[in-house]
Image (cartoon, rainbow, N blue to C red):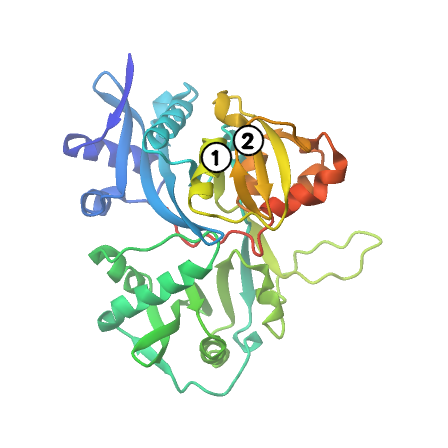
Amino acid sequence: MKEIKEIDHSSYESFCSLANGAFPGLNADQWLQGHIEETPSESLYGLFKGKDLVAGMRSFLFEMNLNQTTIPVGGVGMLAVDLLHKKEGNAYQLIKYFYELNTSKGHHLVMLYPFNVAFYKRMGFGMGTQVYQYYVSPSSFQNASSKEHLKQLSYEDRELILDCYNRVYQKTHGMTKRFPTERELNRPFNFGKVVGFKQDDQVLGYVLYEGKGKDLYIHELFFETREAIEELSTFLHQQADQFKRVIINSNQDDLIHFLSSPESGVDTMLDTAPSVDNKHIVNLGVGVMYRVIDCKGLLLELYEKKHRFGNTSITVGFEIQDDLQDDESKNFTVTFSNGEIQHFHEQSVDTVVQMDISEFSSMIMGAVTFRSLYKWGKADISNPACVNQVNDLFHTSERPVCTKAF
């Protein structure tokens, strides 16, 4: 008989052993227990077979900026299964419990970093924004000559750094809020050094960096003004005498337009006829995946918070296929007027939209457009003349940015 329950002090050691076995080099026992106890928005859950812990996961509660509307979002990480208990459906059971847990708390959206994309697609998760890993020469960053406002930031600036991040969060679709816990305030200094643009007792931009040999790793780069990024760019430009390349992960592909020379110098771009010599720029990775666990509930929440859906007026019937949660929340009718939800009453519709829950999750996050889903056969619509209108409902000016590692 198997049972899922929250992990308490008596099982911390077992969970750390489980996590370390699943993720070599994690050293969970060195940091996890104190972290969970200090952070009420995080919990551990385990799948027990009798008294034995055979699988476990770490759950999170975030506040996310969904295209300028704040919503609570669940997160799951460190999903680990004992090596002797693989292929028994344990991960599947934990993820289903994770859905139930968030549903009971009134959360309509969850997210994770996938260990296996196909597995989580089957669980209803949709792709988010890809992660672009840049390898560029420091000299590629613009040299604005001025560093007048740059300071080496210290522990005394912890709250100013957090305030800067949260102001960026308020303007950036997909980002999650950070809270002033002692661990969060200290976090930047656990990864490297921080140089910030400081003006009028505010940090308006900062770069968290770490040097490793000839490589300069950028762990965080946030800015609020053009002056801030220009001076931070000058700082990076002037490191060319010491470092061969700057390595930075980002959800934003428009960084290449800021650099004078975005080539990575890595000779891995294959030439296939009739292409020309295409220079390699970035490595591309899978980012966060998203999952709507209550489609109608999410739209109701956004309606109550006066969220806007473009500028379109249309009545749409949604038929969302969800093999794990086949309930009434996946089939509903919504009337939009100039981008605002008017009501959910059953009535004649302008069109019916059909798609899988994974594609719906990606679309509502703005990671993919409805037009693209329709183009590739991943969504159907009863009235093709309405494609552009439905596309406008869920179009976002930027794809979601997730800077939270969990």
Residue drawn where x is 28% and y is 55% of the image: 179
Q: Position of residue 332 (x, y in %)?
A: 55, 27
Checking the image for residue 19, the label placed there is none
Between 404 and 292, the one lying in front of the other is 292
Between 60 and 369, the one lying in front of the other is 369
304 left or right of 43 in image: right
Rendered image quadrant of residue 335: top right
Q: Is residue 188 above or below residue 194?
A: above
Marks 1 and 2: CB-CB under 8 Å? Answer: yes
Checking the image for residue 292, the label placed there is 1
Q: Is residue 197 above or below residue 32?
A: below
For mark 2, what is the residue? 357
Q: Is residue 142 above or below residue 389?
A: below
The residue positioned farthest toward the left in the image shown:
10
Q: CA distance from mark 1 to mark 2?
A: 7 Å
323 left or right of 170 in image: right
| Residue type at tag 2 | Ile
Residue drawn where x is 43% and y is 66% of the image: 222
Residue drawn where x is 55% and y is 72% of the image: 137
Q: Position of residue 349 (x, y in %)?
A: 65, 30
What kind of element bears circle 2?
helix
Q: Position of residue 58 (x, y in %)?
A: 31, 37
Q: Position of residue 376 (x, y in %)?
A: 72, 37
**Quarter containing the N terminus:** top left
Residue drawn where x is 42% and y is 63% of the image: 168
Rendered image quadrant of residue 271: bottom right
| Residue type at tag 1 | Val
89 left or right of 158 in image: right
Between 223 and 118, the one lying in front of the other is 223
Q: How many neighbours does mark 2 have within 10 angstroms: few (below 14), some (14-19), or many (20 or more)?
A: many
